[in-house]
Amino acid sequence: MYYSILHKTRFRYSAPISESFTETRMRPLSEGMQRCLKFKLSTTPAATVSSYQDCYGNTVHNFDIPGQHRQLTVTAEAIVVFTDPPKLPRSLGQEAWNLLDDMAAEEELWDFLAPSQFARSSPLLNALASQLDLRRRGDPLSLLHEITGRMYRTFAYAPQTTRVDSPIDDALARRKGVCQDFAHIMIALVRPLGIPCRYVSGYLYHRAEDHDRSERDASHAWVEALLPGLGWIGFDPTNNLIARDRHIRAAVGRDYADVPPTKGVFRGRAENTLEVGVKVMPTEAFIPDTDLLPAVPAPTPAEVDLEATQQVQQQQQQ
């Protein structure tokens, strides 16, 4: 399966600003059953874009707009292909807990077992863990299936009820939020069980027959857990899904703070607003040896919350 992705972000400033510096994490990963075949990042005003790889293997693009401007548009285009995902077992044996403990002892996994900025314990989280009877039982895969389903039934999907920097207690208290909140809550529930968990930022291809709760024209977030014999397996508590060939991974980290699609600073006294449009479309084939990506319909920009400071520009994942 091939997908074309168009992700357009527009920052508007209430007064001219003298300079802006921005970094993005929008290039889809080439890992596992997913490969990014083509990626193009463009900006208006035009800028020279450089890139590096962060400690989690994500591609980070960054650029500086040194001249005066009142608007900045960042357009990311990609072609991604999926190979057929392997069939998952319904469960793992009880010995999987011991195998998991051996894996979790590796130093490179400690980040995905410890509390992080947005995925940490609180009295409200502890109350939910007690309600869900969260403890090691059965096998890790079956337990993660159960947690995903219970999260889906416990929380209502309600855009605009939380902010990009909201702590998980906001969604826990209201029992509603968006995919970013649900991913953080699930990670905070699962890590104390000794299961390495990471946050995934990316996209979900929506089909009418799937009745997904998450919004179509927005980025998406879910959870990956490391399981013995299976590797990193994605769980989507927003839609009660196992992440397969409709979930397109752009970046992974401890939580959202590691993987915002856009983040930056600017010089000047101005208020800023953010518009985001995302379009994910299946495409029949990839045509190499060209700088042009297959055309996709232009998205209708959808407003999302923006962190209320002049220094940081980030978009919430829906």
Image (cartoon, rainbow, N blue to C red):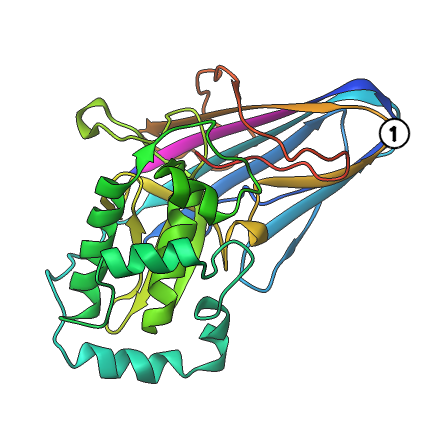
Vertical side of 164 occupied by 107: above or below:
below
- Is 252 displayed left or right of 309 in the figure? left
Quadrant assignment for the N terminus? top left
Dot 1 corresponds to which residue?
Answer: 268
Secondary structure of the residue carrying tag 1 is loop
Q: Where does residue 9 sit, x and y in percent of width and height? A: 60, 27
Q: Where does residue 301 sit, x and y in percent of width and height? A: 52, 17
User: How many residues crowd mark 1 within 10 Å: few (<14), some (14–19), many (20+)?
Assistant: some
- Is 268 displayed left or right of 182 in the figure? right
Q: Where does residue 283 sit, x and y in percent of width and height? A: 34, 28
Residue at the image position 45 percent from the left and 67 percent from the top: 112
Viewer-proximal residue among 140 and 280: 140
Q: What segment carries the magenta color?
A: 2-10
Vertical side of 227 occupied by 290: above or below:
above
Viewer-proximal residue among 93 and 237: 237
Q: Where does residue 239 sit, x and y in percent of width and height? A: 27, 38
Viewer-proximal residue among 150 and 113: 150
- Is 146 displayed left or right of 192 in the figure? left
In the rendered structure, which amino acid carries the disc numbered 1?
Gly
- Is 206 displayed left or right of 90 in the figure? right
**Magenta span has 7?**
yes
Residue at the image position 33 percent from the left and 57 percent from the top: 127
**Magenta span has 22?**
no
Number of numbered labels in the structure image: 1
Quadrant assignment for the C terminus? top left
Residue at the image position 45 percent from the left and 25 percent from the top: 294
Residue 271 shows in the view: yes
Q: Quadrant of residue 4?
A: top left
